[in-house]
Amino acid sequence: MEQKYLPLLMVSLFFVIVIIGRVGVQLASVGDSGIRHAGKLKTTRAVFISYLMFGTLVVQLLLSLLYSADIIEPQIALSNTVTGLGLALCIGGILSASYSQFAMGSNWRIGVDPHEKTELVTSGIYSKVRNPIYTACIVHGIGLLLLAPNVLMLLTGVIGFFAITAYVRQIEEPYLVKLHGQKYLYYMERTGSFLPRIF
């Protein structure tokens, strides 16, 4: 396969496995897609952050399509080493995200419903990191940048990173603190948000 098609392949696999596949598993196991619409959030800012975070995935897909069609081009020299590292990060991100979703079981969700109650998962990978799925998404994004080193992909990745961190800290974790109270605050003290202890 030509190198220019690899970003599109990796983004497509992400959508198929991490989003479509997981929704299918959720529907089959509990009869619920797990998707929670951003419109249920209380503030315009929260809705904007939610759409921005998920919108970056769509933009990455579009950029990958343009890259495969030679409409946008790499802006640094490509090498087998960089391409291999990019593939490893993308595949690792997809596998890590899928594993982390599986570890959540029926409690997995895309989005937040302020009126919904779910169990707090703190075992397995969640005993070290509170948001391993988002960590995997960031890793996947870095891999895409290495496969398609273009300023537009870089800008999209940076926006996606800040959107993810804003979503976690301003929407998701405040909701979980309200839902689980002191139990979640203690959980925050002994785990990292995206990496064990340090971040």
Image: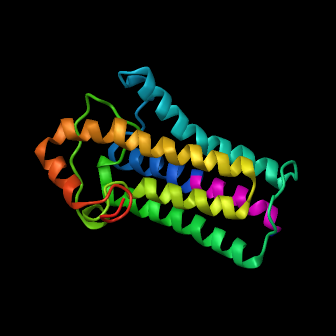
Q: Position of residue 102 (x, y in %)?
A: 37, 59
**Left or right of 199: which side holds 119?**
left
**Left or right of 122: which side holds 19?**
right
> Is residue 50 visible from the viewing direction of this image?
yes
Front residue of 197/18: it is: 197
**Residue at 21 percent of width and 50 percent of height:** 120
Is 121 within the magenta? no
Is 13 within the magenta? yes
Where are the magenta residues, as a range?
A: 2-14
**Residue at 65 percent of width and 54 percent of height:** 12
Q: Position of residue 64 (x, y in %)?
A: 74, 51
**Left or right of 135: which side holds 188?**
left
**Residue at 65 percent of width and 59 percent of height:** 144
**Residue at 58 percent of width and 55 percent of height:** 14
18 versus 117 height, above or below: below
- Which quadrant is the N terminus positioned in? bottom right
Front residue of 105/63: it is: 63
Q: Position of residue 155 (x, y in %)?
A: 66, 46
181 versus 16 height, above or below: above
The dominant secondary structure in magenta is helix
**Left or right of 136: which side holds 150?**
right
